[in-house]
Amino acid sequence: MLHYERAVETKRPAGSRRIEIFSPKIKRRLTLFSRDAHDAWLLLEADPTVRAFCERPAYFDGGAGRVLDFWVEQGNREKFVVLCREDSDAKSLPPSVHGVKLHVLRRPDMIAFARRIENWAQIVPYRTSFMRHADRRLQNDLFARLEKPHRLERIEAAFHPVDVSVVRAALFDLLADGRVSAPDIDFAPLGLDTVFRRAAP
């Protein structure tokens, strides 16, 4: 299996934005050049089966031309991800590049994931802010309490006077690791009524 850790050297596309972010999953900074790339990154952060990824890992062909958007290690498999706004662009792509399967994310896919993206845009800053001070004991206590489903409001109340931000960071770490699930997080706004529970074994 190939392993990519750094983006290839490439110029920022004319007229595109520059988005600087930090990934708690791969523990480094990333520079992205579009809102679609930013949203695709949030989907990678949200997926507990994704073990590693890299932005702009390689070119389609040699050292020039179009750049692949992401390389993703998912379980024992790997894939390249390409973002396409138009179906015509997607149809022109090969099924694999450099011997690795190519997965296309189209604009309708991103729209379908809009709620998940919006919620994880709120979750990631908690994980980033408290990454250096992750409270494993608190995570274990949270996991034990979630033997039965609890709303976020009840979880925070149960661990008072621990700071709410600390509780949320620990809870969201469990969610990112796949130990805890929030079944409605793809369909409803993240809030005090969001229900968390242990993930199915």
Image (cartoon, rainbow, N blue to C red):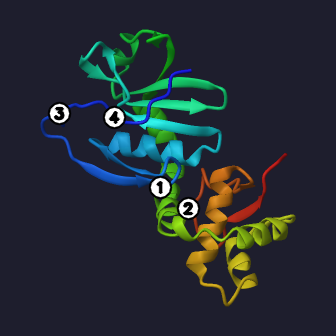
The percent coordinates of residue 176 (x first, y second) are 62, 53
Q: Which residue is mark 2?
A: 189
Q: Mark 2–mark 1 contact, CB under 8 Å?
A: yes
Mark 3 or 2, nearer chain start = 3
Mark 2 vs mark 1, CA separation in Å: 8 Å
User: What's the distance in space between the residues labelled 4 and 2, CA to CA?
Assistant: 33 Å
**Number of other residues with Cα within 10 Å of mark 4, as a class: few under 14, some 14 to 19, many 20 or more:** some
Identify the residue position indicated by label 4 in the image.
7
Q: Give the mark nearer the N terminus: 4 vs 2.
A: 4
Q: CA distance from mark 1 to mark 3?
A: 28 Å
What element does badge 1 sit on?
helix
Q: Residue at x 53, y 64 (%)?
A: 131
Labels 2 and 1: the sequence-earlier one:
1
Instruction: Give the mark nearest the N terminus, 1 or 3.
Output: 3
CB atoms of marks 4 and 1 within 8 Å: no
Q: On screen, 138 above or below 178?
A: below
Residue visible at 52% across and 51% down?
A: 115
For the C terminus, the quadrant is top right
At label 4, the amino acid type is: Ala
Seen at 26% across and 41% down, the residue is 33
Q: Amino acid at mark 3?
A: Lys
The crowding category of the residue bearing disc 1, from other C-alpha atoms within 10 Å (few below 14, some 14 to 19, many at least 20), is some
Q: Which residue is mark 1?
A: 118
Label 3: how many Cα within 10 Å (few below 14, some 14–19, many 20+)? few
Q: Is residue 103 above or below residue 125?
A: above
Residue beneath label 3, please?
Answer: 11
Query: Which quarter shows the N terminus?
Result: top right
User: Could you tell me if the residues under marks 3 and 2 are in contact, i.e. CB atoms within 8 Å?
Assistant: no
Distance between mark 3 and mark 2 Cα atoms: 36 Å
The image position of residue 123, as x and y in percent, is 53, 61
Q: Marks 4 and 1, how far apart in space?
A: 25 Å
> The disc labelled 1 sits on which kind of residue?
Glu
